[in-house]
Image: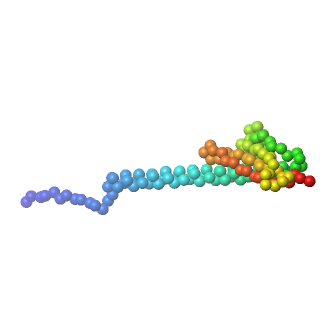
Amino acid sequence: MKRQAAIVTSSGGFGMVSVLVAIVLLAIGVVAISASSAYMVSLQTDAAERARATGIAVTYMEEVKMRAPDTLASEDTVAVSETGAVTEDGAFLRSLTVVPEPSVPDALRATVTVQYPSGFGRTGTVRMVTVIYSGN
């Protein structure tokens, strides 16, 4: 009697190609999640810096509104800290522009502009505008 070798085949396991495809898909998913996480952190940082810049602009606008209207004049851009104090190495840039308001006689338009650092090396801008009556 001759014996014939039996060929055993199994289709119940995973092949090498299937495992490699699964690893590649998992890697793509992890990269996508990490990229979106970095973007979300950037947006959160941008929101925090925008809030600080808005606080600086509001505080300075209140100071401007307390001045006598005849003393209001535009100011050059200055570097300020997170608290709004003028400093050489401040991360925020603040300026004041005062022009006559064309739609209201005897009034001035005061604009406080604050530039703030934003994510990925960009800068953002916050502007506060008010009209101040300068007449008698």
Q: Is residue 69 visible?
A: yes
Answer left or right for 113 relative to 27.
Answer: right
Give the quarter of the image for residue 5: bottom left
Which residue: 88% across, 49% down? 69
Compare residues 111 and 66 and report the one nearer the observer. 111
Outermost residue toward the right in this view: 136
Which residue: 77% across, 49% down? 111
Which residue: 89% across, 53% down? 135
Q: Is residue 60 visible?
A: no
Q: Quadrant of the N terminus?
A: bottom left
Residue 64, image x, y percentages = 84, 49
Q: How many marks?
A: 0
Answer left or right for 125 relative to 63.
Answer: left
Which residue: 19% across, 58% down? 7
Residue 78, image x, y percentages = 77, 40
Residue 77, image x, y percentages = 76, 41
Compare residues 67 and 73 and report the one nearer the observer. 73
Colour logic: rainbow
Compare residues 112 and 39 and report the one nearer the observer. 112
Residue 86, image x, y percentages = 79, 42
Answer left or right for 36 relative to 60.
Answer: left
Outermost residue toward the left in this view: 1
